[in-house]
Amino acid sequence: NLATPRLIKHNSKKNNTTEIKHTEEELIPIKKIYGVVVSINYHDFLPHCLDSCEKIFEKVFVVTDEEDSITPEICKNYNFVECIASDVFYKNNATINKGAGINKGLEKIPKKQDNWVLLFDSDIVFTRQALQVISTNNFGINSLYSATRQTISDFQSYQKFIDDRDFKDAS
């Protein structure tokens, strides 16, 4: 999956989506963006994901389970990444509780009004256009946003995309 640059504002009160439009009073500039990723045994994709994150995030918290020994090793290659190994995924006999892993990552983020958090999966590759959109937008403080995704259906196509790594047209 590729995160593409068109951001959508989700309006929870009206249960619909619209393009980003805010009054100046609602806007807050993005100063720091933190990422939270749950990645358990997703070793093939994680390096590509993290390679695409460096210029976007202040820090990325990768949360994995305590049995996953490869993810922490991958994370050591990135100075902006902190790996959190935890057993929260399986508490209360859960098969996997991804939300508990996300919460582990969220606990690490400094609580400041101008800090932003982006939750994403370890198979997401951010394009240069995504960086441009994020760096040139002010976002509403009472809004939830998401990026549209481009689906790549198989590993061979994914690998071709990574090898080409041009990103001229991400939509």
Image (cartoon, helix red, strand yellow):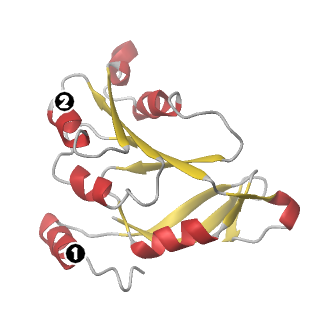
Q: Amino acid at mark 1?
A: Phe
Q: Which residue is mark 1?
A: 161
Circle count: 2
Q: Quadrant of the C terminus?
A: bottom left
Dot placed on the residue nearer the N-terminal end, 2 or 1:
2
Q: Secondary structure at mark 2?
A: loop
Q: Position of residue 76 (x, y in %)?
A: 23, 39
Q: Position of residue 51 (x, y in %)?
A: 29, 58
Residue that appears at 35% across and 25% down:
89
Residue 85 sits in which quadrant? top left
Q: Quadrant of the N terminus?
A: bottom left
Q: Compute the Cα span from label 2 to label 1.
A: 27 Å
Numbered label attached to residue 26: none
Q: Which residue is mark 2?
A: 68
15 relative position to 51: left or right:
right
Q: State whether residue 94 appears in this view.
A: yes
